[in-house]
Image (cartoon, helix red, strand yellow):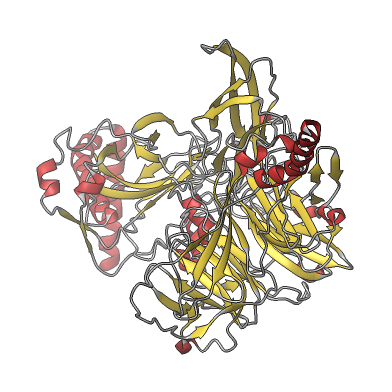
Amino acid sequence: MLVLMLVAVLVAAATLQPCLLASARQLCRTHMVRTGKVFHVRQQIQGDQLYFSSMTSHLIKHPCKKNIALYLGRRLFFTRDNFRSSLLPLSIPTSMKAGLPEVTSAHIAGSVLLLVVSRKVYIYNYEANYWNTSIGIEHPVSHVSGDNCCYSGHPFCVDISNSVFAYLHGDQISQTYIYFSNNGGFRFQKFAYEKQAELVGSLGGIFYFHSLSQVGLLLIDQGKARFSYSEHPLNFSFGLPFDYNGTLNILITPGQKGILIFWFERSLLLSRNSGQLVYPVQVKEGPHTLLSSISEANVTIYSVAANEYELAVLTQENNLYYGSLGILSSSLIKFTGQNIWSQEAALMFTDVGRVEILVPLSDPVFPAFDFEKCPINIQAILMDPQLQVDVCKVELLQGEFDNKMYTIDMNSELELTALMIPRPGMSLVPLAMVSNPHSLGLQAVIYEDGYTYDGNTRHRLNISLRQQHHWGRADPNFTSSIKRPTGSTITLDIANKEISCVDLKPLTALISVGCDQEKKIVIQNEISACYNGILDPVGLQDNYSYVIEREAYDPNFQGQKASEDLVVHYHYEKLGCPHLVYYNTPWKPVVELWREGKFQEVIQAEFVLLEVNGLFTYTYSLTASTALCRSQPQNWTTIMSDAGDKGLFSWNRENYVSCHDPDNDAPLMWPDVPYQILGGPTANKVIFEQRNGIYIFYISIVDPYYSYCHLETTFSVYVYGAFPLSVIPTAVIIIPLMVMLLSVWLVYAIPKLLHTEKGLRFKSFWAHLCRRCRKACF
């Protein structure tokens, strides 16, 4: 009897064990969010209720403002508290006259929500709570695309968030109309894609890949798709083609890393380099089962979510797949054990390693919907022994540059440092990578940096970043144009990191290869007019003004005399005391570069000057010929004629062309014109005419290889030492003076000459001539 009882207990234990494992594999516990329904106050839905055109549910989260999200399904829900309260379905006011309230695409751009409704783009400003229609779109569109930058208020970052494309998916590329907005979708204009008319296929999408500083256009032709790019060096070729089965949803992961996710119900593809190489995602369904793609798993994908580091997939078969978006390719791992799918379920990441399944629930009494949430802790699930996931071999990966933005200007360099600590007995393979190697190059050095209290080795990694052009390693056909500002991300990760390293996220920083906003130029002013007592600083601050004679200036900057004198008010707060310059000495300003209030260097690059009030009483010491120009140099007259609406002071690094450039084929037709560029390889200087007074100059650094910034400022000089010009013509003074001097000389010389032999003969000749004339007269 005892034996039978023991056997029964063993059998029961054996049958119970799978049930215990299944319960241990429970993915999440559901709970319902229900708020604002204590009192029977019925809220009314205003306007036309919106719905999503796709058969699957999507969820868009704002990458910077984590509590803002948009659910797209049979109804749309917009939340500002991460669905922690009941919500009314999103509706568009009837005054917008949107027609059929079908949404085909959506994008959150900064503080506005962009929706494509009935082939038009509408704006919902959720902070001010008002709707508007985008301006400038003249043809039907179906999709919008954009990105968000979360690092800082730097202009480079702001431009990323404000860049939005609108296009008609599936239209023939050669004939389609593409629109671009640089102000967050409020105003669009037609976008001209180079060689668009020559491209064959239909449009699968257009995206601004800021991680690569390229506009990528997805071409679809005969079941294959590939990307075309807008800028050198990628504009000469296409990305590698990949299978395009069905209509792929394209998800750009946050963080400007260049990671793209392509998916529909039977396919899941991934690209880590902005579409240049697209490949299927491998799937791990067990300890020893590895599938080359999710299509081999014979599942139906329903919802996909991603953050900067992770990817999650929900299928209709109640499976959840999870994977890491590290530097090297990694497979998805399959989680099962619970009914988690429903017709309106959507996935979203709430934090690193935290996934949530969201389902809207209708209320028979109130119009506001409740939400069923199923939060999943990925780290806890990965600790299940049945999954046989290796323990993370990294204890620490740390760097001060993580989630920060830096700027590398022309000829600048950036040094970054990271600390790594492996588990005892483990070895690490750190890998640093830039998303835009055509623009940004790196060099990394790793060394041991002591030990921890536990005896673990500390490893230090030093990363040096500079423009790819200045490393001298890359072929010119590989590098992007050095004149064009670009961007890139730098990512540091552990190449041999396990999927269990959920909390050990890669270190990422955004690098702007462009203008350093902290730079400015200052004109050296060691000897001022106030220092020598020529001008009084107190008087200059007391609403000081001076007069420019009409003969000395031209308001149109053409060197023609004006019709009246000009009264100029001097702004001492901006200009300070004028620099002192002697009129008869060739002069060139000394330009200093400052950054964050610290002197950096004296600028030797090329720059130009222009007197802001139109004074033309100065010229230059060199001509085009003596400056050894190979082609006709630019001047202010040609620049202003080409400026149009850009203004008078529009000569800068973007439109400057050096006359010494061998690629400049403009012929040297007028070699004697003044050469108006200072600095650089020439010794050109300014020569003032004979006029004393104040000159206020605008100065601009035009050398395109010195800085990406428009380095410009205004300063003043006081020219002294010139004698006043006479109002009487010179001939009127010189001729009477010469006659007077000649008369004085004759009064002295003639009497003395008459006492000589020649003088007696001369006197006798005139006396004889006089007698003959007298006889002739009689």
- Which residue is drawn at the image coordinates 64% and 82% (left, top)? 139
The percent coordinates of residue 482 (x first, y second) are 63, 43
Q: On the rendered structure, is 294 left or right of 730?
A: right
In the depicted structure, whether residue 639 falls above or below residue 279: below
- Tell me if residue 249 can be seen: yes
The percent coordinates of residue 236 (x first, y second) are 80, 53
The percent coordinates of residue 690 (x first, y second) are 29, 46
Residue reaching furthest right? 222
Q: On the rendered structure, is 729 left or right of 210?
A: left
Splitting the image into 4 quarters, where does residue 250 fall?
A: bottom right
- Which residue is drawn at the image coordinates 67% and 45% (left, top)? 25
- Which residue is drawn at the image coordinates 29% and 55% (left, top)? 731
- Which residue is drawn at the image coordinates 25% and 48% (left, top)? 574
Q: On the rendered structure, is 391 left or right of 539?
A: right
In the depicted structure, whether residue 444 falls above or below residue 329: above
Residue reaching furthest front? 1
